[in-house]
Image: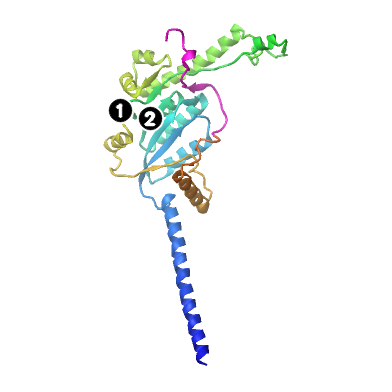
Amino acid sequence: MALDVDVVLDRRRLLRRAAIWRALAILVVLGAIGGGIVASGGLRGEHIARLPIEGAIVSDRKILTLVDKLAKDDKVAAVLVSINSPGGTSVGGERLYNALRELDERKPVVAHITTLGASAAYMAAIASDHIVAQRTSLTGSVGVLIQYGQINQLLENWGIQVDKVESGALKAEPNPFQPAPPAAVAVLQSVVDDTFDWFIGLVKDRRELSDAQVARIGDGRIFTGAQALDAGLIDAIGGEKTAVDWLVAERGVPRGLTVRGYEVGDEADDGFLARMGDRVVDRLFATIGLRPSPFDGQGPVDGLWSLWQARAPSDLPEGQ
């Protein structure tokens, strides 16, 4: 009988221990979930949102959706547009500019150019009322281009001839199989000129530039941050703190707010567990140095290019 009592007591002790371990496990899970909520911003307070504009700018619905989300989020006190991009397509730049202008009507917006903010990326910057750049940042490159190649000489060397039937003399011109006719080049030039007039007019109006200042930047040159300040393309030299200080001093944003970074894709509503899982994976990859590129799958290329890229020395005219 005593043996039976000991067995019962042992079982009770085991049950108590098991209950304690279950309780601890539940607390760990709840703590992880709570940490995930905080990490994903579920319990965040009022803050400044950092919106990244990086890589080639195209008509990307994801970034436009994120801009709209920030405009509607009551906890976003202001938006810091962090730019590191060589530009992109004219249509992508135009759509992003319009979205940022709408955002600026609802929230204070400041732009900060880090390494590079040229062409269509500079178009995004002028959507804000204040632009900050680093001393050695590259910006400007206000211009538009269309590029086309020709392989007619190569085909001729190989004895290959390409013919076509067309509805009009300028349909699909210029094409790579025949020398570009002057009329086709003139049409392309008119398209480039029309888009450039719109772009440079936008810069002149938003930056309140004189005709002399417009003439200086109209050749498409790039500027360092210091040169851009002298040319009237930016407002201040500095980093993110300089941009935030302007929001506080000129737009009445409360001092001391956290700057919270967003990423394109944060606007998707895939459910809490999916978002928390993505956050955990992102942090794990970042910790071990294998973070995936946020620019994969940017979307289709559309319209004319408003893009800066450095030329190789061999591409420069002789003597330069």
Three-letter amino acid code of the residue under disc 2? Ile
Query: Quick one: SS at disc 1?
Result: strand
Q: Which residue is mark 2?
A: 113
Q: How is the image coloured?
A: rainbow
Q: Which residues are magenta?
A: 298-320
Is residue 302 magenta-colored? Answer: yes
Q: Is residue 275 above or below residue 178?
A: below
* Mark 1 burial class by Cα count in 10 Å: few <14, some 14-19, many 20+: many
The residue type indicated by label 1 comes to Ala
Q: What is the tally of numbered marks visible in this picture? A: 2
Q: Residue furthest left?
A: 249
Give the left or right position of residue 241, taking residue 187 as reference. left
Q: Disc 2 and disc 1: Cα gap in Å?
A: 11 Å
Q: Nearer the viewer, residue 42 or 281?
A: 281
Instruction: Give left or right: position of 228 versus 284.
Output: left
Percent across and percent down for residue 68 are: 46, 39
Q: State the mark number for residue 236.
A: 1
Secondary structure category for the residue under label 2: strand
**Quadrant assignment, res 28:** bottom left
Q: Do residues under tags 2 and 1 come within 8 Å of each other at their CB atoms?
A: no
Provide residue 1's location: percent of width, then percent of height.
52, 93
Query: Residue at point 46% right, 74% down?
Result: 17
